[in-house]
Image (tube, rainbow, N blue to C red):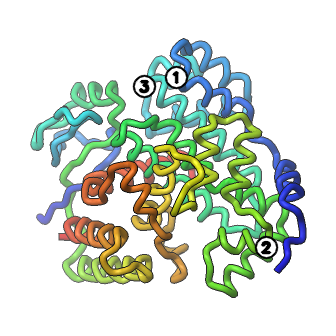
Amino acid sequence: MNSVHSVEEILKSVEALPSMPRAVAEIMRTIDDENTTPEMLARIIESDIGLLAGVLKLVNSSYYAVSGGVSSPHQAVIILGFNTIRNLACSEGISSFFRKNKSSDFNFDRFIRHSIAVACCAKLLARELKLNTEIAFVAGLLHDVGQLAVVATLPDMYRTVQEYKKLHGCHISEAEQVVMGTDHAQIGAHLVKRWNFPIEISDAIRCHHQIFDPDKDSRMVDLIHVSEVLSHALDLGVPSQLQEDADQVPPLSDGAMHRLKLSFQQLEPLFDEIEDEYSDVTQLLGV
Amino acid sequence: MKMRIKSIPIAQVEHGMKAARVLRNPSGQILIQEGVELTESLLHSLERRNITRVYVQVEELRSDEELAAERASMEARLKVLFRNVAHGSTLELLYQTILEHRLRKLT
């Protein structure tokens, strides 16, 4: 089957997607900046009214149960801490972006649950490996954003990809390569780069299905790949009513496990924590 | 009364509940020993350390038949998910690790 569009045309089309709130990328940039103050983080959140409302709703939810309530992001940073608020703001911004691009052609519930599942695996594996947990969480949340972009901007092409995948029983990336000449990993990385997210995130998104030789040598790339596999293995993101017999654990790169010096037995004590984190985040984001 | 261990958010801890497992911080230091009562001041100090959940004992409400059915469906689903995994591969090890982990939780 020949590609009906060139890769450049496809990348141009997905750029028509409503953009990720600029505030989310700005918040991500504060991660590596030790000079960021609570006022600076609060000001970024306040610059986006939708994000501000979402963050205040989350910090006032029963999950945090802050006595007396929280009325400003500055107060929220002081009470709950920098990392918690940064994580909440990114999760809220990204999930509202996902919802804006919801399409009836697509099993959106499965998509968002799987994204959160990979994000939670990535966060706890990053903690174990002493990598940046916030970068890992956001990279996990966004790892499949390319799929959402294709559904929202090129729905006919998405249908052709799904038909090819079903007919040949192949992995989605293989179907995408045949139909589009590129895949959701490349498309997602392209978008995230355009939104000025940290380069580590776009590299991890681009390589999350490259099991033999990722084109980038980075622990974050390997971490997102392993998190993708682990999320499927733990069956996270797939509530029983959405389970299908076609579900299966994707291939794993032994190289990635080796480079991260990881064994699954060593990760076993984390399984409960990953499942708890997943249930907390889905509940908090109302998924 | 049959009990089981469950992790719950700190906000849901009820008066008199005790820690059912040792609680450690991310660097591995012990914050609470097993069996310690989860008083309000202890919970506040956990929140200040960004700990959001604790393990407590709750009543096991499932019957033996329900537990057996849950175990059978868990094993069947794992077999579906790992159906194409090669013998001796790293993924087979992952399968065994998850199976043992889930069986431990069901007994």
The residue at which mark 3 appears reads as A67
Residue A11: percent from left, percent from top = 83, 53
Please report the residue visible at 37 percent of the width from the left and 70 percent of the height from the top.
B91
Please report the residue visible at 69 percent of the width from the left and 60 percent of the height from the top.
A184
Corner quadrant of residue A50: top right
The residue at which mark 2 appears reads as A179
Q: Chain of mark 3?
A: A
Q: Name above or below for residue A275 compared with residue A55.
A: below
| Mark 3 vs mark 2, CA separation in Å | 54 Å
Please report the residue visible at 57 percent of the width from the left and 50 percent of the height from the top.
A286
| Viewer-side residue, A199 vs A17 | A199
Neighbours of disc 2 within 10 Å: few (<14), some (14-19), many (20+)? many
* Residue type at tag 3: Ser
Q: Nearer the viewer, mark 1 or mark 2?
A: 2
Q: Nearer the viewer, mark 3 or mark 1?
A: 1
| Earlier-in-chain disc, 3 versus 2 | 3
The residue at which mark 1 appears reads as A76
Q: Nearer the viewer, mark 3 or mark 2?
A: 2
| Mark 1 vs mark 2, CA separation in Å | 47 Å
| Mark 3 vs mark 1, CA separation in Å | 12 Å
* Residue type at tag 1: Ala
Residue A87: percent from left, percent from top = 53, 35
Helix, strand or loop status at disc 3:
loop
Please state the total of marks drawn on the protein image: 3
* Residue type at tag 2: Val
- Residue A217 in view in this figure: yes
Q: Quadrant of the N terminus of chain A?
A: bottom right
